Amino acid sequence: MKLRSRYDREILLLALPALGALAAEPLYVLVDTAIVGHLGTTQLAALAIAATVMSTAFTIFNFLTYGTTAQVARFHGAGQNHQAAALGSQALWLALGIGLTLTAILELTAPALVTLMGGTDDVKDGAIVYLRISALGAPLFILASAAQGYLRGMGDLRTPLFILVAAHIVNASLELLFVYGFGWGLKGSAWGTVIAQAAMAGAFFAVQYRAGLERPHPHKMHPLMRIGSEIAVRTTALTGSFLVGSAVLARIGAASLAAHQVAFQLWVFLALVLDAIAIAGQVMVGRMLGASQAADARAAAVRMIAWSVAVGAVFGGILLALGDVVPDLFTNDPAVIAKADEIWPLFALMMPFNGAVFALDGILIGAGDTRFLMWGMLAAAAVYVPIVLLTLHHDWGITGVWWGLVALIAVRLVTCGARFAGTRWALTGAPA
């Protein structure tokens, strides 16, 4: 890889604040866990169930962030900032509608969802209470996600970072006050989160208002709904695949599931850096294609892929070098460490390929090629799930599940790489 490129500075200026914003979410969950964890095991277990339900729902609806980013970046690149602001407005109204619908569904189905997640007795009661309170924040969270998409598309990744950090500080302060100062317990944690989300949504709404806010027009929401549905299917397929893997490992044995949890959570954490580069890809590629600069879009994309692979390779090297140390930081159970040792080389060697896949994903989202990404992810899931299920049948253990994950990444790399090598993704001009 060349030491310098004219695209490096912009990639860095976009990726660093994007990384900060991405890292804010796991830190936010970590703070919630720490505060509730001191209340007792029952409360912590209730939080775990409710938070899993909420995070799964929010992950599926992150299409508003990605879809809005790509469309706004194209308008911005074409010099049509008024249309970009109008699209951002429609994204907010769409987010509000989706969020209110999600709130209604969660309020009605909370007991059934908690039971499905295995909640019983006091844990079930606590999880239902927390879920029903936190569900009130769904419209606020999804609205904030849509607004982030608008700001990213305009190349402004610092404002979302400042708002998110401020919201998390408010959340932590309110939770400490409500949980311990007022003695509200688990309810206090949920209400602190909802109020912080309201402040966050208000700040994002104010930014959008200054940029230009128009009334809702359903016909203008159709492009976002189309792109959103394709990204939602892609995300659901990926999330569902991982759930199948965890379910199979739970049946293989506790040690295998625990080792998988250690490696997979590290995999997710390291993916934050790679995803930050992918977000830079969404912004730059969308803007350049909007400005009819297809050659520049491809050149910048190649550079982003190179950086993402290089970062992935560094992560892989560190993981290989510290393979005898890192698992010990998470557990002292010899059985879990032995299972982690079985998959550690696969985990480490995957990282450069993960880098390429993440970058290609961001590039193709920026290009608006979401239908291809949807079918590509479904193809990858169709390879991964049978391997994982066969693992249970043939007793391949945790190694079989991780070879399935390798296959999933390989299919995504081949499909996305082949698409990028062609020209069909590089359509220029503002969105139709």
Image (spheres, rainbow, N blue to C red):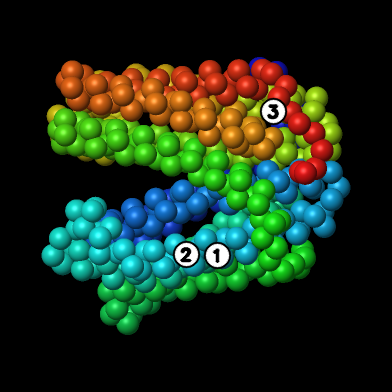
Q: Is residue 350 visible?
A: yes
Horizontal and vertical percent position of residue 149: 64, 52
Could you tell me the amino acid type at mark 2? Thr
**Which residue is situated farthest in the bottom direction here?**
182
Spatial distance from mark 2 to mark 1, Cα to Cα? Answer: 6 Å
The residue drawn where x is 24% and y is 37% is 247
Q: Is residue 42 visible?
A: no
Viewer-proximal residue, 49 or 218? Answer: 218
- Label 1 belongs to which residue? 97
Contact? badges 2 and 1 (CB < 8 Å): yes
- SS class, disc 2: helix
Structural crowding at the residue carrying mark 3, measured as other residues with C-alpha within 10 Å and reported as few (<14), some (14–19) or many (≥20): many
Could you tell me how far apart the alpha carbons at marks 3 and 2 are, in whole angstroms?
A: 34 Å
Name the kind of residue labelled 3 in the image. Answer: Trp
Amino acid type, mark 1: Gly
Instruction: Measure the C-alpha gap from mark 3 to mark 1.
Output: 31 Å
The residue beneath circle 2 is: 101
The residue at which mark 3 appears reads as 425
Callout 3: SS: loop
Residue at the right extreme of this rendering: 79
Side of 410 where 341 appears, left or right? left
Q: Which quarter of the figure is the N terminus placed in?
A: top right
Q: Residue 299 carries which label?
A: none
User: Of the residues under marks 3 and 2, which one precedes in the sequence?
Assistant: 2
Q: Residue 321, image x and y in percent?
A: 38, 21
User: Looking at this view, is 244 or 246 the one in front?
Assistant: 244
- In the displayed structure, would residue 394 be above or below residue 269? above
Query: What's the residue at 28%, 80% (across, down)?
Result: 183
